[in-house]
Image (tube, rainbow, N blue to C red):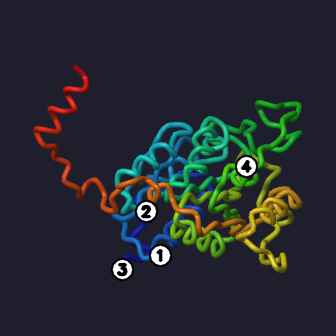
Amino acid sequence: MATLKDFRNNVKPNWCPGCGDFSVQASIQRAAANVGLEPEQLAIVSGIGCSGRISGYVNCYGFHGIHGRSLPIAQGLKMANRELTVLASGGDGDGFAIGMGHTVHAIRRNIDMTYIVMDNQIYGLTKGQTSPRSSEGFKTKSTPSGSIETALAPLEMALAAGATFVAQSFSSNLKQLTHIIEEGMKHQGFSLINVFSPCVTFNKVNTYDWFKENIIDLEEIPDYDSSNRVMAMTKLMETGGMLTGIIYQDKVKPSYENLVPGFKEEGLSKQDMKISQADFDKLVAEFR
């Protein structure tokens, strides 16, 4: 059985010292080992941005896609080989700006995969501009007088789009984050995990101390029911989206793959892809 070390490689991350993404990487590696995966059973697809580098830092299959397009690539990968455990990853700009259309439709489609968003409320790789997650009044190089836009509420959006697994964690809470990723991997459907991952270089507002002061752990809320969608939405709205933990999970709704008629359990790589001459001639005849 694979251990944490088996998911490590010799590529040294070049994130800024103190970046929250280090903890996300470590949590993914720990979660993969804890659920009993081997490196060849895991694939990570990433987009563009600081977080996009993560697909090359874990010893498994990796694909570094283009900006905002990790989800369509990851969904195609899962449909081609449903035996793989597929993770997509990106930042709040990657997933909630240029990639928002893909995010919404991946959520409602409910393919069996996990999407981890490293949310630092800023564009880090391009040296500090306002993102869809930046709060009103947030001052950056692109909004020197302060942002006049409303910050996106991604978890409320996910619930409205029909998500079957919605969770949030903080990069400093390695134990909780690892557990949430494990549960996301095991969930039969699309799992959205938003991770507060502070940018220590460009975001001097949403710092580690700021998150520690504002986060509300679901364990502190008595009688919380993660299967109650209305309760999940209500608590998110009451807390301004600062909840951490598994916020909502629907264990009943089948995944996309299980609704496709005749979709085989085995991956394409193990299927006989040959076509008979008769079937080939029939297909060609349709284009004459």
Q: Position of residue 143 (x, y in %)?
A: 81, 31
Does label 2 or label 4 sit earlier along the sequence?
A: 2
Q: Nearer the viewer, mark 4 or mark 1?
A: 4
* Residue kind at label 1, given as amino acid type: Val
Within 10 angstroms of label 4, few (less than 14), some, or many (20 or more) residues? some
Q: CA distance from mark 3 to mark 4?
A: 38 Å
Secondary structure category for the residue under label 1: loop
Residue nearest the observer in this picture, 31 or 172: 31
* Residue kind at label 4, given as amino acid type: Met
Q: Is residue 120 above or below residue 184?
A: above
Which residue is at a point 42% across and 66% down the rendered structure image?
A: 8
Secondary structure category for the residue under label 2: strand
Query: Circle 4 sits on which residue?
Result: 157
Which residue is at a point 37% across and 56% down the rendered structure image?
A: 61
Query: Circle 2 sits on which residue?
Result: 85
Query: Circle 3 sits on which residue?
Result: 1
Does label 4 or label 1 sit earlier along the sequence?
A: 1
* Residue kind at label 3, given as amino acid type: Met
275 displayed left or right of 192: left
Residue nearest the observer in this picture, 250 or 187: 250
Q: Position of residue 63 (x, y in %)?
A: 41, 48
Give the position of the N terminus as an image quadrant.
bottom left
Q: Nearer the viewer, mark 1 or mark 3?
A: 1
* Residue kind at label 2, given as amino acid type: Thr
Marks 4/1 in contact by CB < 8 Å: the verdict is no
